[in-house]
Amino acid sequence: MKVAFYSTQAYDRDSFDLINQNGMHEFLYFDINLNIQTVKLAQGCQAICIFVNDHADADVLRALAAIQVKIVVLRCAGFNQIDLEEAKRLNMQVLRVPAYSPEAVAEHAVAMILTLNRKTHKAYNRVRDGNFSLNRLIGFNLHGKTVGVIGLGKIGLAFCKIMHGFGCKVLGYDPLATQVPDYIHLVTIDELFASSDIISLHCPLLSSTLHIINEQRLAQMKDGVMLINTSRGGLIESKPIIQALKDGKVGFLGIDVYEQEEKLFFKDLSEDIIDDDDILRLMSFPNVLITAHQGFLTREALFEIAHTTIQNLADAEQG
Ligand code: NAD
């Protein structure tokens, strides 16, 4: 099958080419995001392959249908970027990668905790500047600390397992969780906020979880709490978190995702970032660590994504 592959990241091609060695599909790689202007690149293809930052709204889907594209494969689990109702109406098949290496994201959350706590990012810059001073680099032991985990799905559970290994007390909140390992103490969300030294978000972005971290919730937390978000930006409300960082209520913030992310994905980062006051304000705090949605970015995860997507294309071809 001929597949229009939209990706601005070279690493995608490497993993897809490796898995597609037998040439089962013909991928046409386009170093650009999908949008109404770039739809025409898919002319002559039966399928398109896209990611979280490609917008497949109703207009885009109708334009794709007009050039006979019948299959959309997503190289991700989430599907907020595609108008599923319209896809159904147009009789298009939409397939995704529901799960890939939950450890990748869980380990990134842990890496953020360790970096913030031991101030490794500051120490690295200092030593490169020839400054070997240890002033203001004191961290704390993770052993014995209480870690609150919101969302006990694939990634949340992988994260809990690692934190338990560090000797942390693990509190979990998930309205749908039934059976969890013994070392996770299921608590109410209020209890979790009040008792945790570190809080890590691993729930999806839904109307019920939008701004789950807001002014009222921040007030419930311990002073100096560490917050980690590797899930979706909309889980944390930007303005109150900025205030909480100023007040010292939040002692550390690690975010791989942020509310303004989609906007940033679409244009050159530098230009957009200058206009974006909230992300700039967050960047100004030395106790804030921001990464560019790279939680999933391990070799293993990329191969799993490529493998499942190629299989999805084969399944879709067979109807
Ligand atoms: P999952 O579906 O396995 O687990 C999500 C869990 O959240 C479920 O157990 C669900 O019951 C729970 N949940 C739903 N509503 C909740 C609420 N109101 N409060 C608490 N828990 C709630 O998903 P997953 O694979 O573990 O992924 C978790 C999130 O990680 C995804 O939604 C996605 O946003 C994010 N993610 C990020 C990256 C990255 O690169 N940073 C990569 C993949 C996924």
Image: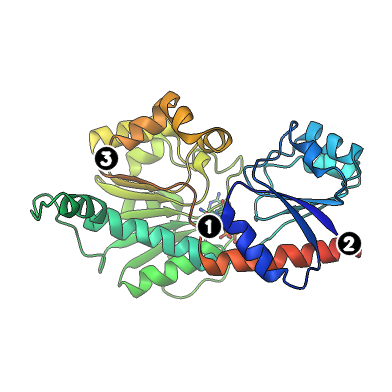
Where residue 188 appears, x then y in whole percent?
Answer: 45, 54
Q: Name the element at disc 2.
A: helix
Please tell me which residue is depicted at 30% across the width and 72% down the height of the picture.
Answer: 167
Comes first in the chain, label 1 or label 3: 1
Mark 1 belongs to which amino acid?
Asp
Q: Quadrant of residue 14?
A: bottom right
Of marks 2 and 3, the one in the foreground: 2
Mark 3 belongs to which amino acid?
Lys
Return the residue nearer the eye: 99 or 120: 120
Which residue bears the numbered disc 1? 174
Q: Which mark is residue 317?
A: 2
Where residue 168 appears, x then y in whole percent?
Answer: 31, 68
Q: Which mark is residue 249?
A: 3
Return the residue nearer the eye: 142 or 55: 55
Mark 2 packing: few (<14 Cα in 10 Å), some, or many (20+)?
some
User: Where 269 sits versus 165, above or below?
Assistant: above
Say left or right for 153 vs 275. right
Can residue 157 be seen here? The reply is: no
Please tell me which residue is depicted at 51% across the width and 59% down the height of the picture.
Answer: 297
> Ligand 1: which quarter?
bottom right
Mark 3 packing: few (<14 Cα in 10 Å), some, or many (20+)?
some
Q: Name the element at disc 1.
A: loop
Task: Give me the C-alpha separation between circle 1 and circle 2.
Answer: 38 Å
